[in-house]
Image: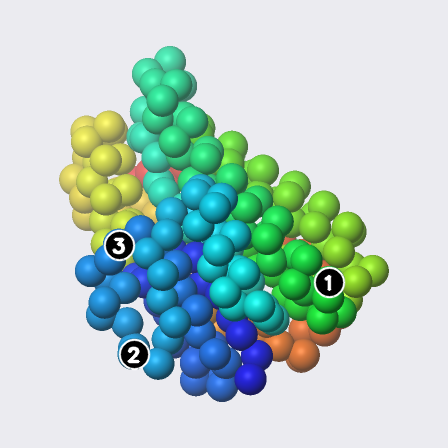
């Protein structure tokens, strides 16, 4: 049975990925910093409380797996919502570290196992913020753009070993994390939560938010043999973002 590792897989997009890969018949391994959320996962999943930027912990998890067919480097945080002059260096570093270094460390320690097997699929979670500029979210956008560069490099470097790399760019995803973003942007812009929400939806041609399941479905495809020659691609699952600066 093929093995899938999902970082930050205990809730949100990560958990949806785990459930979708499980339905497809994969053996699921999950890391997350949230012990309570890990405890609510299916008992058939292998779980480990680990910070995505803890190299020793990530190396230990991959070492215990011994084999990995699909890596979903999904760990990320929203970071601060502020004008660039008001962003604290500590907040910048924290946001970039989790979003970018977490993906780097997972790929670093998964690559040798995939090389040994002569195959594998690395899926990095970026964002539409990694395609457009994103006012008031400089650290997050910078990290998500960097994820694209990392992915493109992995695709070129690992392709000769039969390993594919792609990035999924979710748009605005329904859920607890997005509610936090909406609240912070509403406060920063002097708007209500519903006004900001409507602005995000109006910024897409489909006029709606994305569900975590939509992201999970794309991940399962990218991890499958149906995508055997899909590599180095930036794939937005966002209802087609037209306006990266949501407003009324």
Labels 2 and 1: the sequence-earlier one: 2
Give the image location of residue 31, x and y in percent.
39, 59
In the current view of this chain or complex, which residue is farthest to the right? Answer: 160
In terms of depth relative to the viewer, which is nearer, 248 or 128? 128
Q: Give the residue displayed 23% in from the left and 67% down from the top.
A: 39
Q: Are marks 3 and 2 in contact (CB under 8 Å)?
A: no
Circle 1 residue: 115
Calculate the distance from the C-alpha at mark 3 to the C-alpha at mark 1.
Answer: 31 Å
Circle 2 residue: 43
Give the image location of residue 97, x and y in percent.
45, 35
Circle 3 residue: 34
Q: Give the residue displayed 44% in from the left and 74% down from the top.
A: 28
Local SS, label 1: helix
Corner quadrant of residue 191: top left
Give the image location of residue 190, x and y in percent.
19, 29
Q: Is residue 83 above or below residue 177?
A: above
Quadrant, the C terminus: top left
Labels 3 and 1: the sequence-earlier one: 3
């Amino acid at each position: 049975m093929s093995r899938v590792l999902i970082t930050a897989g205990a809730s949100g997009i990560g958990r949806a990925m785990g459930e979708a890969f499980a339905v497809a018949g994969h053996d699921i391994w999950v890391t997350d910093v949230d012990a309570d959320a890990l405890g609510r996962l299916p008992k058939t999943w292998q779980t480990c409380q680990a910070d995505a930027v803890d190299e020793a912990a990530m190396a230990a998890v991959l070492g215990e797996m011994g084999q990995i067919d699909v890596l979903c480097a999904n760990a990320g945080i929203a970071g601060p919502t502020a004008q660039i002059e008001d962003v604290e260096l500590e907040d910048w570093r924290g946001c970039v570290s989790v979003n970018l270094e977490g993906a780097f460390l997972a790929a670093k320690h998964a690559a040798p196992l995939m090389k040994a097997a002569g195959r594998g699929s690395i899926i990095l979670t970026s964002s539409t913020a990694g395609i457009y500029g994103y006012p008031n979210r400089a650290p997050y956008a910078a990290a998500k753009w960097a994820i694209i560069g990392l992915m493109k490099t992995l695709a070129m470097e690992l392709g000769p070993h039969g390993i594919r790399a792609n990035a999924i760019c979710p748009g605005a995803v329904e859920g607890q994390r997005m509610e936090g973003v909406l609240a912070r942007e509403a406060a920063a812009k002097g708007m209500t939560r519903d006004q900001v929400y409507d602005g995000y939806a109006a910024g897409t041609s489909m006029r709606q938010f994305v569900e975590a399941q939509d992201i999970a479905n794309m991940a399962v495809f990218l991890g499958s043999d149906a995508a055997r020659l899909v590599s180095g691609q930036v794939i937005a699952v966002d209802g087609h973002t037209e306006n990266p600066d949501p407003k009324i």
